Image (cartoon, grey):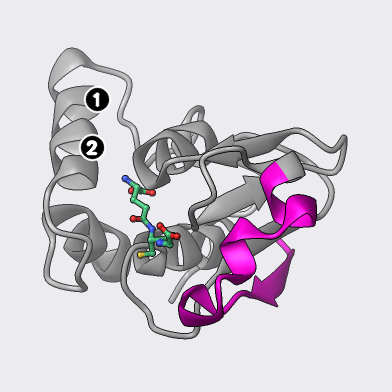
Amino acid sequence: MRPVNGSGKGQGMFTLYDTSTPVTASKIRLLLAQLGKPYRWVELDILSNETRTPGFLAKNPNGRIPALELDDGTVLAESNAILWYLAEGSPFIPDDDCGARKFCNGCSSSSTATSPTSRLLASS
Ligand SMILES: N[C@@H](CCC(=O)N[C@@H](CS)C(=O)NCC(=O)O)C(=O)O
């Protein structure tokens, strides 16, 4: 994988709240790696309701993962919103209408490794 350093949104350290089962957040982890963005990984066990603790609900009121915490404490929820935030300003969202729509389309399709966005990220 060839990181695209210095592009995409956000500076500093991110914290990704996620589960060990690589489902919804797999594209986020792939994009963070491609962008060369450092991040902490906090594993939450959804079967033990670790996403429903007062501490996590204070960060993300919808009580779901993935969630991405920026180093100013802002917490972004919803995998598509997180992907868009990270990719904005990087080559992963080409600077034309079709590029943006393709990225959007890939975000919304299956979260598995075979989705268009995952293939796009993996092939660069
Ligand atoms: N639309 C959300 C779905 C998030 C979602 O359903 N996350 C699940 C794990 S994959 C979850 O946190 N479940 C725990 C719960 O609802 O308490 C996204 O794409 O981020």
Report crowding for label 2: few under 14, some 14 to 19, many 20 or more residues within 10 A (C-alpha). Answer: many
Name which quarter of the figure residue 102 lies in: top left
Q: Quadrant of ligand 1?
A: bottom left
The C terminus lies in quadrant: bottom left
Residue 53, image x, y percentages: 70, 60
Q: Which residues are magenta?
A: 36-57
Residue 122, image x, y percentages: 29, 70
Relative horizontal placement of residue 107, taking residue 19 as reference (left or right) = left
Task: Please name whichever residue, 50 or 42, is drawn nearer the observer in this view of the structure.
Answer: 50
Task: Please name whichever residue, 29 or 78, is drawn nearer the observer in this view of the structure.
Answer: 78
Q: Amino acid at mark 2?
A: Phe
Relative horizontal placement of residue 7, taking residue 94 as reference (left or right) = right
Q: Residue at x 40, y 47 (%)?
A: 79
Residue 8 visible in the picture? no
What separation in Å lies between label 2 and label 1 (alpha carbons)? 5 Å
Q: Amino acid at mark 1?
A: Ala
Residue carrying label 1? 100
Q: Which mark is residue 103?
A: 2
Task: Please name whichever residue, 99 or 77, is drawn nearer the observer in this view of the structure.
Answer: 77
Residue 1, image x, y percentages: 43, 76
**Residue 38, magenta (yes or no):** yes
Q: Residue at x 63, y 42 (%)?
A: 60
